[in-house]
Every structure is written in C-alpha cells, then in structure tokens.
Amino acid sequence: MIEKRQFYIDGAWVDPAAPKDLHVIDPSTEEPCAVISLGDQADTDAAVAAARAAFDGWAATPLDDRVALLRKLYDVYKARAKEMGAAISKEMGAPIDYANANQVGAGTWHMSGFFKALEGFSFESDFTATEKHLKEPIGVCGLITPWNWPMNQVVLKVFPALAAGCTVVLKPSEVAPLSSLLFAEFVDEAGFPKGVFNLVNGDGPGVGTQLSVHPDVDMISFTGSTRAGIAISKAAADSLKRVSLELGGKGANIIFADSDEDAVKRGARHCFANSGQSCNAPTRMLVERSRYDQAVEIAAGVAEATRVGPASEPGKFIGPVVSEVQFEKIQKLIETGMQEARLVAGGPGRPEGLNRGYFVRPTVFADVTNDMTIAREEIFGPVLSILPFDSEEEAVAIANDTPYGLADYVQTEDDEKRRRVARRLRAGMIETNGQGFAQGSPFGGYKQSGNGREGGKHGLDEFLEVKAVSGWAAE
C-alpha cells in the first residue's frame, strides 16, 4: 500500500498539522491502495500564507521566465507519463491503456494548447493614444479539482493560473488524490519558486470550505457537482472573491433522420466512455421518429458489446465507477429507470463474472420522456436514455428543457439545419457530426453547468484582472 501523508507547501513536503488518515480505495478491487491525510485549518492557512508571500515576486517575474518553467513542467510530465497513468488507473479505475492515452494525454493536450495561446496573448493593449489596458494576475487562487478526469482538470487550472502570474493552492479530490500528489512532484522537479504552487489534501467540508472562505484567497476555481458548486459560491460570497465553476451536465445528442449511419453507435460509445463519468457525456439521445426503433436496437447492441473489466488489464473496455457511493447512486437510478421507461440493455447489478469492484453494466433505456428522473438527473455512469422526437422544434425544446447547459450534440447531413440548431441550443459547447473541438477551445457551460471557461486564451482570462490606465503616453 502506498502511503502519501505529506502536503506540498512553500516548496517543500511537510507533515500535516494534525494527521487524519483516509484510505484511497482501488475501485476495481474495493481494497485500500493508499493512505493519505486530510488537512485541517492550520494546513490550509500555511498553504495560503505561502502562496500570498510568493505572489508579488511571481507576478513580477517576466512572462518568458514563467513560460520557461512551465515548459520544464511539461517535459517532466511527459518523461514520467507512465507513472501518472498508473496512478490515475489505480485511484479512479480508468483502464490502464485508456488512462495512459486519454487521461494522461488530456494533460499534455491542454499544456500544449496554453503554450499556443500564450504566443498570441496580450497582457497590455493601447486603447487610445493616451489610455492603456492591462491584464494582471488576480492573486492567490484556490483550485479544487474532481476525481473523474484528474489531470485534465488540474492542468486546466494550474497551468493558466501560473502563466498569468497567480500563485495557487490545489485541493484535489480526496477520492483520487494520488495523481495530484505526483503532479506536485513534477512541479518540484521543474524548479518553481517556493510558495508558487502548494497542495493540501482534504475534503469539501474541510479544506474546500476553508479555501472558499479564506480572506487571503482571491479566487476559487472549482470543478465538480452542481450541488457543491452552489455551496462553494455561498461560502465565497462574504469575501466577494471570484468564483469560476465547471459543474454538471445532461447532454442532449440530437440525431436527425438524415444523420450519418454511425451517429447512434458513436453517441452510445461516447456516453459509455470513461464509464460514463464525464460531465459532458451525451446521456440523452434524442432520435427522430423514423429512425427511432433502429437507434434503440443499435444502442442496445453497443451496450451489450461494451466489455467491462478491471483497470489493470490492457485493451479497450470500460472500468469500474470510482467508488461505492457512486456505484450505489447509479444502481438506484437504474432501478428508478426500470419503473419509468423500457430497459433494452444492461440493468442493475454487476456484469457477469465480476463479483467484486464497482462495476456497472452499460445500460440503455428507451421510450424515455424528458420529465423522467433518468432524463433530469446527472447519473454519472454508463447509462443512456433514448427519447423520440417528431420535429426540429420539438428536438430543440427537449434538449433545452434541463437545468444544465454544458455540452449538446447535433447529427445531421444538412449543414444549414446543423448550424441553425446549434445556435438555438442553450449550452456552452455544441459538437456536431462527431467533430471534436480544437486545442484551446473554451470549455464550460450555461445555467447550472457553471460559469467561466477553461482552456486556451479563455482559460487565461479567468485568472486575470483588467486595469484601465489613463494618461499613458505612447512609448
């Protein structure tokens, strides 16, 4: 068993002030795989104080020097990528090949995207001949990251914050903290100044809340559930600190009759990827009536063909969900769905041959209506709901009838209709015909899916204040 008790504060690994041990559970075996300690107020205060003390010097460091250190971090990350893949696979259950390619790869993808964004990013601009506009770092940032895509979210927060000149305190999910502890090792190896990057393990009610209310924290950037995002916003309100939120989703995938023949298969696979544990997953499949029966049959076939297995095995399949809490939540929602709609694949319980581990059967429900629980709640597991529609107007109305607005999907060979529908959907990201987003594209949502955007130049702007200065003579 790995023992990772220490925190990274002020450029050094330090023991917790009052150790409170927590076992990290391997979701493939349900056995402890590591021991960490949760921080208390003294640990949070020490990390924030270190970040505050380092801020002025780091903010004044020339951009080229900051970027040079970030490039060193990028090189360390790539050199130790297999260590990172193993950590992510063990802590949250991503199959090892998927962890190495997709989970670890998300980190390098976003790092590279930030380097490109910085090449054309202006921290100063002339508004008039005598007025200058400056973009300056907001200050000390508390970064709270989730367990489902650990390095994707750590990089989307840490990289732009440090590039902007901010200093940070990272609180990773206590469910999957090993990858972030390894990332702290990478930061240390890259040689960042003391106090620029700090890490304290903890849970939401503890360190998460302490960062949210801390008077010396200027910004909170949080990724997680909508429920937790609301709590963080309330906690941060008294100090009026900036709060950036990337929250839940209930993505609609609109499949018109004229979509390509692989649209249904592609949508079902996307829903089940990462064991359904992605906030932007297309979990509501809306199918035009003339292709509905065929779509149900195809989606059920994809579910039945999707292999489920332990994360340590090589190959293409889905692993367990992350924890017993998530497993039980998903099981209850599947049982609810069986009372509401027509089960066409999967169902409750573990897949055949898997008697231990938090494994969920890829599940498909047909004849779903948008008022059903399984169409309203974010299940966060490999569960797909299929709804019929008869017109473009109805499809858009169903898609938008949700408290969420993170990512929606449109499948049609009619370019004019594809663009028209994309404009009408109330979500921050609209993927059409399986075309992925470009590097540096803004990630974030409308409504209860949060506020702010991550990635590229939009992600940099999240960590900057804008200052207008009059009477600035031309240089």
Image (cartoon, rainbow, N blue to C red):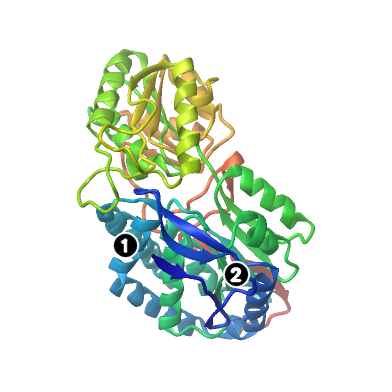
| Residue 192 seen in the figure | yes
Q: Residue farthest to the left?
A: 315
Near-viewer residue (20 or 304): 20
Q: Is residue 302 left or right of residue 192?
A: left
**Where is 227 relative to 115, above or below?**
above
Q: Nearer the viewer, mark 1 or mark 2?
A: 2
Q: Quadrant of the N terminus?
A: bottom left
Percent position (x, y) of residue 63?
50, 81
Q: Which residue is mark 1?
A: 86
Type of amino acid at the residue the image marks with label 1: Ala
Q: Quadrant of the C terminus?
A: bottom right
Count neighbours of disc 2 (C-alpha within 10 A) and say few if under 14, some if 14 to 19, many if 20 or more: some
Near-viewer residue (211 or 280): 211
**Where is 391 relative to 100, above or below?**
above
**Where is 456 relative to 75, above or below?**
above
Q: Write the residue at 55% across / 85% down.
A: 194
Q: Write the residue at 27% across / 32% down.
A: 352
Q: Which residue is mark 2?
A: 19
Percent position (x, y) of residue 234?
73, 50
